[in-house]
Amino acid sequence: MSDFEHGKSDKFQWTAEEDQKPERAIVLVPEFHGNQVRSREARLEEAVSLARAISLEVIDAGVIPVRTIKPSTLFGSGKVDEIAGIIKSSEIGLAIIDHAISPKQQQNLEKEWNVKVLDRTGLILEIFGERAQTKEGTLQVELAHLNYQKGRLVRAWTHLERQRGALGFVGGPGETQIEADRRLIQERINKLERDLEKVKKTRDLHRSKRKKVPHPVVALVGYTNAGKSTLFNLLTGADVMAKDLLFATLDPTLRQLNLPQGTRVILSDTVGFVSNLPTHLVAAFRATLEEVIEAELILHVRDIAHEDSEAQSNDVYSVLSQLGVEEDGRKKVIEVWNKVDLLEPEALQTMQDVKSDTPQQILVSAVTGFGTDKLLEKIEDIIADSDSVIDIVLPVDQLCRLPWVYENAHIIERNDLETGAVSMKIRAGREVRSELKQISEV
């Protein structure tokens, strides 16, 4: 039997509406010896789900063991020929390789197979391009896309004419070809970076205004499709798009959340993470993801019923660390173990027994509401303990500490008194509050 077990399996066969005429695609998952953390089944399922996320018709899918990487085509010549036969007989127009490939490998495979070829990075960029709704999101995706393309100018670009605009790979003829000249691409990149800097300043302004209100920010993060948006909707009563679909949510959403004892927080939901998330995207979305960095508390939502939950968790912490969250991405994080409704009763009971002494992990179901009361109580306990609003008065002889106060606390209100002292309402953590009580008149 061939290493590549292909066929029109019901598990992977999926067709969009007939009038959409989706691109027929084959999904190939390279398997390299000795460095695979996830099971081959889980990797194949995720790769097919990524293809489904942009309405492709997955005709065939398979895992291909790669014993020796070929610099020119990644796969060996025999495997390249075998796949070429599958592509031709099934009238496939797009090949997706669930791994990063070099520009030369991409060019050679396109010649051998006579179809468009996308690697994992290109596919994720395509999904993000389709999902982006706001001006900021569109700018971020285009910036990431152009940075990705800048190193791929060795390719023939005629097949990049497309219907959906300057972000996609898969659409057909109908729009202007992206300039293949590196200088023009760099000029466009420079302009996008300037535009995004303006967006960042606007976002910083909005964030500073929120800091003047005594409502700390709690950010939801997690692997894509872990149930973040479903949980967000349950807790806030919002109607954020929540589907069994990778990257269903892209642009950030903020809602006020009232906790059981009356504490109010701002809950933030944004794009899910994924393994091998392109560095171009992490960099481009930094302005959006700064909501996570600035949050007083991060809720890491995990699909605890997924067989690769631990590996997915490690991927999330890796991205958080890249964004600047300290302690390898684990500072101020509590884990929300979601989808416990999918566990067998015995497995759930065992998990509850094991985690009874681990308060930083809360078991919930965003579908049934199980455990959300404990989650809200935990959020309130942490916020109340770490970030409270107090009134202080800095006497004249302590005004030299004002810069320190501004750096370490959120100033809600300030009044300069006739005596020369300064009265302020601030929101600060426990250590800062303790320090201020020693120098304040109140």
Image (cartoon, grey):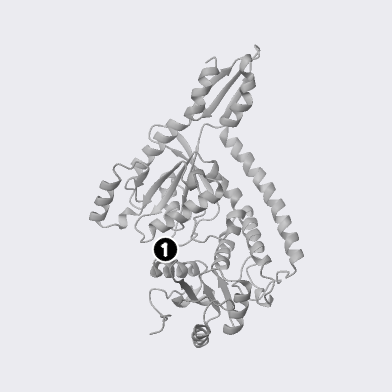
Residue at position x 49%, y 55% from top?
272
Crowd tier of the residue under label 1, counting other residues whose Cα lies within 10 Å: few below 14, some 14–19, many 20 or above? few
Q: Residue furthest left?
A: 346
Q: Quadrant of residue 262?
A: top left
Residue 189 lies, in percent from the top left, at 71, 58
- Residue 212 lies left or right of residue 18; in this view the side is right
93 or 117, which lies in front? 117
**On screen, residue 210 above or below 233:** above
Residue at position x 44%, y 71% from top?
33
Q: Quadrant of residue 182?
A: bottom right
Q: Quadrant of residue 74?
A: bottom right
Q: Quadrant of the N terminus?
A: bottom left
Residue 116 lies, in percent from the top left, at 59, 77
Residue at position x 39%, y 48% from top?
336
**On screen, residue 130 above or below 174:** above
131 or 406, which lies in front? 406
SS class, disc 1: loop
Residue 132 lies, in percent from the top left, at 58, 58
Residue 129 lies, in percent from the top left, at 59, 62
Q: In this view of the protein, can residue 263 be seen by the observer?
A: no
Count of numbered tags: 1
- Residue 142 lies left or right of residue 214; in this view the side is right
Q: Amino acid at mark 1?
A: Val
176 or 310, which lies in front? 310
Q: In this view of the protein, can residue 101 be seen by the observer?
A: yes
- Residue under circle 1? 37
